[in-house]
Every structure is written in structure tokens, then in C-alpha cells.
Image (cartoon, helix red, strand yellow):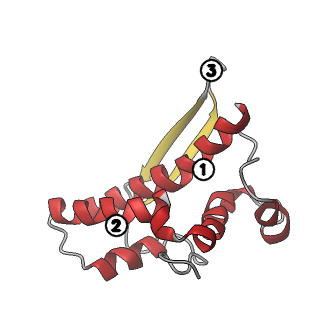
Amino acid sequence: MKNGRSGELSSGESKDDKGFDMTISIDTGNSGDDFSTTETIIHEGLLEADYLAKDFAKDGKLNYDNISNYVKKDWLQGDISNYNHAQNFVDRRRVGGENLLWPGTGYRILQEANKNLGANKTNEQIQSKMSGFVGFYGKLFGKF
């Protein structure tokens, strides 16, 4: 992510075989502030973790069976590193971004964080930062 913190979510089957573990890691070596850190955590939790949790809920396995065949085979051709982002893009086209955890709920949380942190970002700046996570992210809200 440009001009902010970068983060990633790692996951795997739990050691006790009763669930799965997720860890959000934030790269504190990149330039960033409290708002950027909050944005990264919200993105990882509401997009990445949400899609992984939905996948696990289907059959108790992390196997990406909640990702459409279009995304897996036609678009990304097996590149699992972007499955969640690409499926979110498809879902935003289908139901509109405001109806999803990311970007809809994430945007509302970031508006509140903006106020609480005194970050003085405009709504347009918040949306621009949100769309900067992935180059193909496209329109955040509404169907397109």
C-alpha cells in the first residue's frame, strides 16, 4: 500500500483441529500513522479474514470453495494470493460495496476512526486510501 502501513493475514488449520488460526501482521517499518494502521487492520479483518471464515464455515476446511470458479480458474488462473480481493470485486459488482463488510462496514468504521484519531481526512480521502489496497479494486460503492 502506498503512503501507509502494509499488512497481511496468515491463516492455517489450528493445532487442535477444531478451527483455524489467523494472524494479522503489520509492517511497522513502512511510513504510516495511527489512521493507516487502523485502516490496514480493518482491511485485513473485514476482507481477508471474512472470506477465510466463510470458506472455513462451509465445510470446516480452508480450501477456497467459497471463491467462484470464474475468479479461481478464468480470472486468476490458480493464483490464490488474490482470491479474496478478486472475489470481493465480483461481490461488489453483484450486490454493491456498501452492502459488504469491506468496503461498506469498513468505510463506516474508518469514518469513526478518522474522527476519534483527529486524522482530518475527507470522505474522498478515506475512499481513495481504501481503493489503494489493490490496483484492480475499482469502484467501492454501488454496483458497476
The answer for how far apart the CA atoms under marks 1 and 2 are is: 28 Å
The vertical placement of 56 against 91, above or below, is above
What residue sits right under mark 1 in the picture? 51
Category of crowding for the residue at label 2, using alpha-carbon neighbours closer than 10 angstroms: few (below 14), some (14–19), many (at least 20)? few
Q: Residue at x 40, y 59 (%)?
A: 105
The answer for how far apart the CA atoms under marks 1 and 3 are is: 18 Å
Label 3 element class = loop
Q: Nearer the viewer, mark 1 or mark 2?
A: 1
The vertical placement of 77 against 27, above or below, is below
Q: Residue 68: horizontal and vertical position, in percent? A: 76, 59
Q: Residue 34: horizontal and vertical position, in percent? A: 25, 59
Q: Residue at x 29, y 78 (%)?
A: 123
Under mark 2, the amino acid is Ser
Q: Earlier in the sequence, mark 1 or mark 3?
A: 3
What residue sits right under mark 2 in the picture? 31
Circle number at residue 18: 3
Q: Residue at x 56, y 80 (%)?
A: 138
